Image (cartoon, helix red, strand yellow):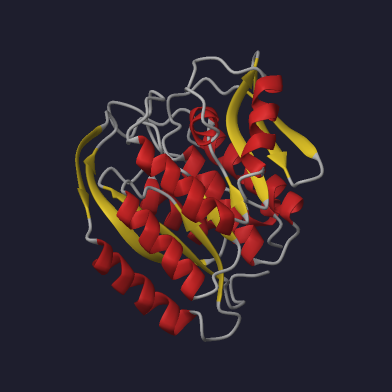
Amino acid sequence: MTFTDEPVKVLTIAGSDSGGAVGLQADLRTFAALGAHGLCGVTVVTAQNSWGVTAVHALPPPFLAAQLDAVFSDYATVGDGIGAVKTGFLARVELIEQVAAKLSEYNARNIVVDPVLVNYQGVPMFPLEVVAAYREKLLPLATAVSPNRHELLLLTGQKPQAELTLVQAETAVLRLHTLGPRTVLAKGLRDGATMVDLFYDGHEMTQLRSPWLPTDNRKGSGDTLSAALAVFLARGIGKKTAVLHAHQFTQTALAHAANWQIGHGAGPLAHWLTAPKEQGMA
C-alpha cells in the first residue's frame, strides 16, 4: 500500500500513559507508523514517567461503553469497517466485562488481547478475579492473545517465576490455547543470549528468535507487538505472516531507540523510524 491509499481502521482499548511510552500512546504511534487509522477507547488514565506509575484513575464502565458505542456506530459501518481491535490495560473486572460485551455486540473481528496483568518487575497487579475475567470473558473472543511469560503463567493457573524454560513455556502456551483464543503469541522469553517469542496457531508451534538487545528502552515493546499484529490482521494477512511482520517491526523499533535517553529511566521505542516497505506495506 501507499500512504495515499485509504487506511485500515484499528481500535485500541487501553490505558493512557502521561509519559507517552506505553499503552494507548504506543498503540496509536504503531498504528500511524504502519499506515493505519487509529481509533481508541480509554480505560484508565495514569500518572507515570520513565521511572514508573504514581497514580491510576479507572474510568467508569458506562463512559467506556459510550466511547465504544461512538466508535463502532460510525467507523464500523463505513467501507471495510473496523479491521481489528486490540485490548490493553483494563485493570478491573467491570471494565473487562464491558469490553467483552461491546466486542460481542458489534461482532468485532481480529481481536488481539494483550493481557496486562503484571508490572514492569513481573509482579501481579490485580486480584485473581481480574485474571478469571480475562479467562472467561475475553480469551474466548480472541483471535490472538499475547501474554509475556509472567502473564502466560497467571492465565494458566500458575505462579509467575523468574525463569521459564522454552519447554515449560510451550506447555503453558498449549494450555492457554485450550481456553479459547484462536492463536497464542507468548512474548519476551529468553534462551541464553536470544530472545524468543512463541506463536501457536492450533497446529504448529513457531519460535521467533532475535538477539538480546542491551538497552533499557523497552517500555511499550509488548504494546507495540500486539498493536502491530492488529494492523497486519486488519489487512487480511494470514495469522502467521502477520505475526512475523509484527515481530520484525517491533525488533526494528527497539533497535532504533536503543541509545536514546528520553527520560531518567526506561525509554520508548522508535516507531516512526521503521521503513514501511520493510513491514509488508509496499
Residue at 40% in and 37% down: 117
> Is residue 226 at all visible to an observer of this figure?
yes
Q: Specify the quadrant of the image occupied by residue 198.
A: top right
The image position of residue 246, as x and y in percent, is 63, 48
The image position of residue 31, as x and y in percent, is 51, 59
Q: Nearer the viewer, residue 148 or 263?
A: 148
Which quarter of the figure is the C terminus placed in? bottom right
> Is residue 270 at all visible to an observer of this figure?
no
Which quarter of the figure is the N terminus placed in? bottom right
User: Going by the image, does 194 lie left or right of 154?
Assistant: right
The image position of residue 61, as x and y in percent, is 27, 62
Extreme residue in the right direction: 203
The image position of residue 53, as x and y in percent, is 24, 35
User: Going by the image, does 172 lie left or right of 131?
Assistant: right
User: Going by the image, does 191 lie left or right of 62?
Assistant: right
Q: Nearer the viewer, residue 54 or 168?
A: 168
Extreme residue in the bottom direction: 78
Residue at 31% in and 26% down: 265
Residue at 33% in and 56% down: 95
Q: Nearer the viewer, residue 126 or 250?
A: 126
Whether 113 is drawn above or below 76: the answer is above
Q: Specify the quadrant of the image occupied by residue 213.
A: top right
Q: How many marks?
A: 0
